[in-house]
Image: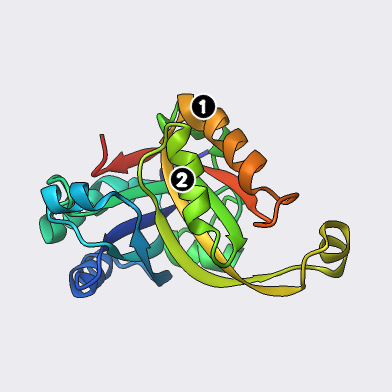
Amino acid sequence: MDTAHNPRLLITITDVGDEKKVNAAFHALNLHVRYQLHGFGTAPSMILDIFGASKSRHLTCGLLPKSKVKSAFDILDEKLHLAKKGHGIAFTVPINAMQTRLYNLMTKNDTPEEKGDESSMSENSKFCALVVSVNSGFSDDVVEVARAAGAGGGTIMKGMREESNAVATQFSIPLKDEQDFVMILVSRDKKREIMTAIREKCGIKTEAKGILFSLPIDEVFGIE
């Protein structure tokens, strides 16, 4: 298997106002597919003041082959100075399946690989990303619980959740509902404790109706 072409999801979290710099970096990398969302960070105001960071955050996602990760970090650092604290973070997430046409567009390779190396990346990674979907208004509860369990700050985004009839019936939740999405980067040794705390306080059986999952991160930049 040519692991250099294993697909990755590149995610950057930067200050609002840096969109042009981020777009310039992604354009320089020839990333054909990307998504952008607006949210805000949850780091305490004192920390934001110290590092000159903004609470308003801009999240950009793009697909790229593993072989481009290093050059992506180099270009992002050149455009955004991510090596300096408070200037944002960038990380990659392994993808273990992808549509053939999209894969060919991303890698320009005639031999698509439907399977990546998520399991091995997950085992070797020092960090993971927790993604929590809760009913609107419960994001602060998630952050509070996660911090008490040893997590740092996170990023909150607004959106909608759509469920199948079976899920809606089983968990007594509406088919469509406004949601808060919380993304928190944590070290692997704290993942289980933090996930357990969030599940108990903000899980599907609580008023928050939270759904929680983790994503493996194989490389990270801008966080110690």
Q: Earlier in the sequence, mark 2 or mark 1?
A: 1
Q: Nearer the viewer, residue 55 or 6?
A: 55
Say which residue appears at 71% left-offset and 75% top-offset.
176
Say which residue appears at 40% left-offset and 52% top-offset.
65
User: Callout 2: few (<14), some (14-19), or many (20+) C-alpha neighbours within 10 Å?
Assistant: some
Q: Which amino acid does label 1 sit on?
A: Glu
Is residue 46 shown left or right of residue 136? left
Residue linked to disc 2 = 144
> What quarter of the picture does the C terminus occupy?
top left
Q: Above or below — where is 89 with respect to 199?
A: below
Determine which of the numbered discs, if any, sits on residue 113 in the image.
none
Q: Nearer the viewer, mark 2 or mark 1?
A: 2
**Residue 152 pos. (x, y %):** 36, 40
Q: Nearer the viewer, residue 220 or 72?
A: 220
Q: Nearer the viewer, residue 222 or 51?
A: 51
Residue linked to disc 1 = 123
Mark count:
2
Q: What residue type is labelled 2?
A: Glu
Is residue 174 shown left or right of residue 15? right
**Residue 94 pos. (x, y %):** 49, 45
Is residue 4 shown left or right of residue 162? left
**Residue 83 pos. (x, y %):** 15, 45
